[in-house]
């Protein structure tokens, strides 16, 4: 079996859906499970829908209408027969979404988020599955929530591997072409959960692990894993092959081409991961597999923008010791700050974090009771793997360096 994953960029419009079909025809789709994300920027649009539900009810319907409109344009482009079942199926999903908002009683943002955000994936897979059937690529649409089970840590839930394995082994017919949703799962009470933004790569890896698949291919708008994000760095070069370890490190530091949790399940079963261009499906792309040396061996650049650098020092020149550090980490954990880099000296402690849940103000209030606090908002965190002097100098040019940390093989630089 093989597992394919198509992200939002690959199915952003009707052309994208037709291209997905062309990729399947070119590469073969026997015994294939295809994981698909929401179309284009749908998830961002759904985030606005949810925000309006909580903060600006007057704009709720217009935000939902935006989502409906994008999908209608694609539907009209793909299906000539306007009485095709797909129109009713998609309408049903939007009705379900509206019904949820009408009847929901929960004030829990994260819960509501997970019950609604995934309509993007449910709709995209409905459209794609119908389209493929229509043009002769017979497939089965499956609801991922019946297979992948998680805890109820909404918006970043953790997989219950035993139950998921059991479901996939007992219920999935692997001998056909299956189409399913990335990003979504469900908890023990069958409420929808999500695996974290950009989590569809991880969905592909979960299925591949439980199916002991031969390979996973994630189809991207880039030729493969490059040594830098081409949006921010000129002359990014294709890495033909990298090890699982390298891929985990790159993803961990923020190379957003692969979701950080994707690699570990594949590495455990030594399932190769291919990252390929959906525009050039016969090109080799990047192969991530066991122990492969980085080819070519060049510095790899990663940037995370909009990070926060918090520097703390003790109020009375006392040392920052284990107790303080553990207290600082408890607070970072409490406010769900994702920690990127830490650095400490006798009386100071700096931490660069990702304020994913908008809890910065609360965190700072807490910290200021105990420490002198300096906070730099909107900093960039650069990481260079396999760095050399030239690469570091080039990067630091024209930037104010706030923090720099060198370890063997990796340098991290926070700049403003
Ligand atoms: P998907 O459509 O699957 O969601 P993403 O947008 O998440 O795809 O990932 C592809 C994007 O990742 C590329 O367009 C590119 O801008 C970005 N990217 C970041 N780092 C890298 C890298 N090292 N190599 C290739 N692409 C990268
Ligand atoms: N649609 C989700 C997101 O945009 C999941 C994914 O694309 O991987 O975050
Ligand atoms: Mg994505």
Image (cartoon, rainbow, N blue to C red):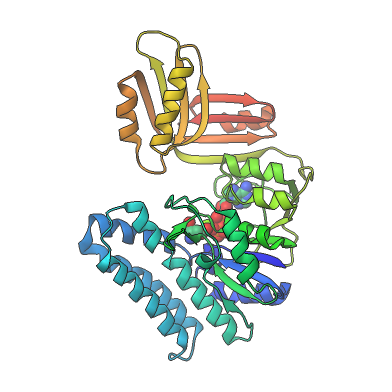
How far from the left and from the top, in percent, is residue 22? 65, 76
The image quadrant where one finds the N terminus is bottom right
Q: Is residue 341 above or below residue 118?
A: above
In-front residue for pair 45/180: 180
In-front residue for pair 320/403: 320
Q: Is residue 126 visible?
A: yes
Left/right placement of residue 64 relative to residue 77 reads: left
Given the current orientation, which residue lies at the most extreme left position? 58
How far from the left and from the top, in percent, is residue 126? 49, 76
Q: Is residue 37 above or below residue 361?
A: below
Q: Is residue 398 visible?
A: no
Q: Residue at x 27, y 60 (%)?
A: 53
Q: Residue at x 39, y 35 (%)?
A: 334
Q: Is residue 311 above or below residue 87?
A: above
How far from the left and from the top, in percent, is residue 85? 46, 87
**Corner quadrant of residue 405:** top right
Left/right placement of residue 170 relative to residue 155 reads: right
Left/right placement of residue 271 relative to residue 57 reads: right
How far from the left and from the top, in percent, is residue 221? 60, 60
**Corner quadrant of residue 177:** bottom right
């Amino acid at each position: 079996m093989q597992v394919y994953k198509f992200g939002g960029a690959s199915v952003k419009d009707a052309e994208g859906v037709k291209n997905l079909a062309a990729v399947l025809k070119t590469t073969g789709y026997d015994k294939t499970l295809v994981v698909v994300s929401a179309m284009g920027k749908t998830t961002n649009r759904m985030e606005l829908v949810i925000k309006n539900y909580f903060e600006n009810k007057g704009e709720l319907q217009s935000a939902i209408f935006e989502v409906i409109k994008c999908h209608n344009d694609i539907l009209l482009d793909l299906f000539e027969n306007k009485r095709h079942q797909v129109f009713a199926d998609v309408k049903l999903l939007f009705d379900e979404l509206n019904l949820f908002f009408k009847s929901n009683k929960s004030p829990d943002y994260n819960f509501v988020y997970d019950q609604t955000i995934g309509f993007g994936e449910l709709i995209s897979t409905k459209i794609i599955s119908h389209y493929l059937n229509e043009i002769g690529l017979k497939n089965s649409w499956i609801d991922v929530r019946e297979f992948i089970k998680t805890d109820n840590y909404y918006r970043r839930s953790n997989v219950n591997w035993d139950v998921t394995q059991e479901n996939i082994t007992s219920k999935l017919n692997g001998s056909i072409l299956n189409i399913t949703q990335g990003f979504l799962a469900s908890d023990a009470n069958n409420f929808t959960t999500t695996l974290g933004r950009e989590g569809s790569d991880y969905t592909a890896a979960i299925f591949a692990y439980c199916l002991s698949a031969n390979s996973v291919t994630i189809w991207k708008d880039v030729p493969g894993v490059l040594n830098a994000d081409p949006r921010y760095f000129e002359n990014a070069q294709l890495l033909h092959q990298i090890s699982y370890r390298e891929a985990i490190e790159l993803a961990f530091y923020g190379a957003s081409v692969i979701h950080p949790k994707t690699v570990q399940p594949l590495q455990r079963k030594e399932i190769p991961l291919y990252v390929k261009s959906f525009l050039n499906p016969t090109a080799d792309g990047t192969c991530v597999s066991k122990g492969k040396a980085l080819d070519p061996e060049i510095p790899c650049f990663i940037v995370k923008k909009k990070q926060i650098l918090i520097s703390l020092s003790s109020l009375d020149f006392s040392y920052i010791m284990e107790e303080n550090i553990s207290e600082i980490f408890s607070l970072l954990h409490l406010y769900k700050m994702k920690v990127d880099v830490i650095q400490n000296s006798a009386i100071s402690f700096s931490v660069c974090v990702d304020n994913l849940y908008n809890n910065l103000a609360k965190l700072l209030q807490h910290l200021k009771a105990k420490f002198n606090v300096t906070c730099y908002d909107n900093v960039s965190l650069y990481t260079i793997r396999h760095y050399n002097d030239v690469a570091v100098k080039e990067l630091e040019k024209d930037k104010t360096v706030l923090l720099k940390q060198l370890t063997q093989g990796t340098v991290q630089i926070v700049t403003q």
